[in-house]
Image: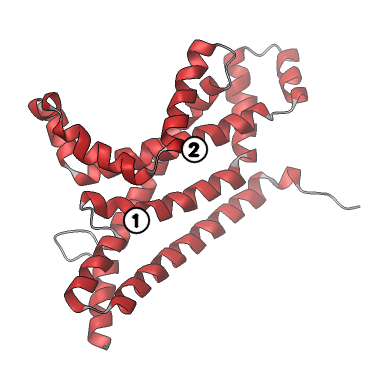
Amino acid sequence: MIDILNQFWRAYLFWDGQRLSGLAVTLWLLVASISIGFVCAIPLAVARVSNRRWLSMPVRAYTYVFRGTPLYVQLLLIYTGIYSLEFVRSHSLLDAFFRSGFHCAILAFAMNTCAYTTEIFAGAIRSTSHGEVEAARAYGMSWFTMYRRIVIPSALRRALPLYSNEVILMLHATTVAFTATVPDILKVARDANSATYQSFNAFGLAALLYLVVSFALVALFRRAERRWLAYLAVRTH
């Protein structure tokens, strides 16, 4: 029993010299997808709240599609659907990219979380205090300067609680990566269960790892909220 648990832990937590462990792959999928999604969501959120329909409508359509369809289906379309197209297989760069399940998983996760993050940031931008905007205009700031120095920093701080939930949900969503044969935590658990038939041990340790990572992320975001949202705290006299 102890030997089996040790084998599970090594598969989940350690690098065997040839490939990353399940935990490392899961964390890399999470970090890569939310980083790409975060960077792309900021300009898309600005476009989403624009009064110019030719600018806001494409972003609105993008967020509706990716929020309205399951991530599992999106991953299947990117991993198996796109690669089945002739022009993709005939192009060397596209063929190399979409042949990799890891690349497809990151692309699917990044596009999915970017859609949700865009709406979160857009809502925070819309709720920006009118007084902050008027003060920026009174100082003679241009539109670009006002967004760069006032609107976006303020919106990102206020969006932090909602964004933390999105990151946790993205961690849980990485469990569908096994569809693209990516050896994440769940893929390792499934393989361990198939090899040993120790279902409780295999999936129990996987659940424990997800729980530990989730608690660590919650702690980090709570600390960030105490630092950057302190000005919103209710002051008692």
Q: What residue lies at 58% left-to-right and 29% top-to-bottom?
A: 122
How many C-alpha atoms fall within 10 Å of the one at disc 1: few (<14), some, or many (≥20)? some
Quadrant of residue 69 within the rendered picture = top left
Labelled disc at residue 13 = none
Q: Is 134 in front, or is 167? A: 167
How many C-alpha atoms fall within 10 Å of the one at disc 2: few (<14), some, or many (≥20)? many
Query: Where does the image place residue 33, in percent across and percent down from the top left?
Result: 37, 42
Circle 2: residue type: Tyr
Q: Which residue is mark 1?
A: 175
Q: Which residue is mark 2?
A: 116
Q: Is 96 in front, or is 31? A: 96
Sequence order check, earlier mark of 2 and 1:
2
Query: Where does the image place residue 112, in percent across and percent down from the top left?
Result: 40, 38
Residue 49 in the figure: left or right of residue 71: right
Residue 55 in view of the camera: yes
Q: What residue lies at 22% left-to-right and 64% top-to-bottom?
A: 15
Query: Where does the image place residue 29, in percent across and percent down from the top left?
Result: 33, 49
Instruction: Name the quarter where the N terminus is drawn.
Output: bottom left
User: Measured along the vertical axis of the image, is residue 109 above or below residue 129?
Assistant: below
Q: Secondary structure at mark 2?
A: helix
User: Measured along the vertical axis of the image, is residue 19 above or below residue 202?
Assistant: above
Query: Where does the image place residue 23, in percent across and percent down from the top left?
Result: 32, 62
Q: What residue lies at 37% left-to-right and 44% top-to-bottom?
A: 71
Residue 86 in the figure: left or right of residue 48: left
Residue 24 in the figure: left or right of residue 191: right
The CA distance from mark 2 to mark 1 is: 18 Å
Q: Is 62 in front, or is 217? A: 62
Quadrant of residue 10 within the rendered picture = bottom left
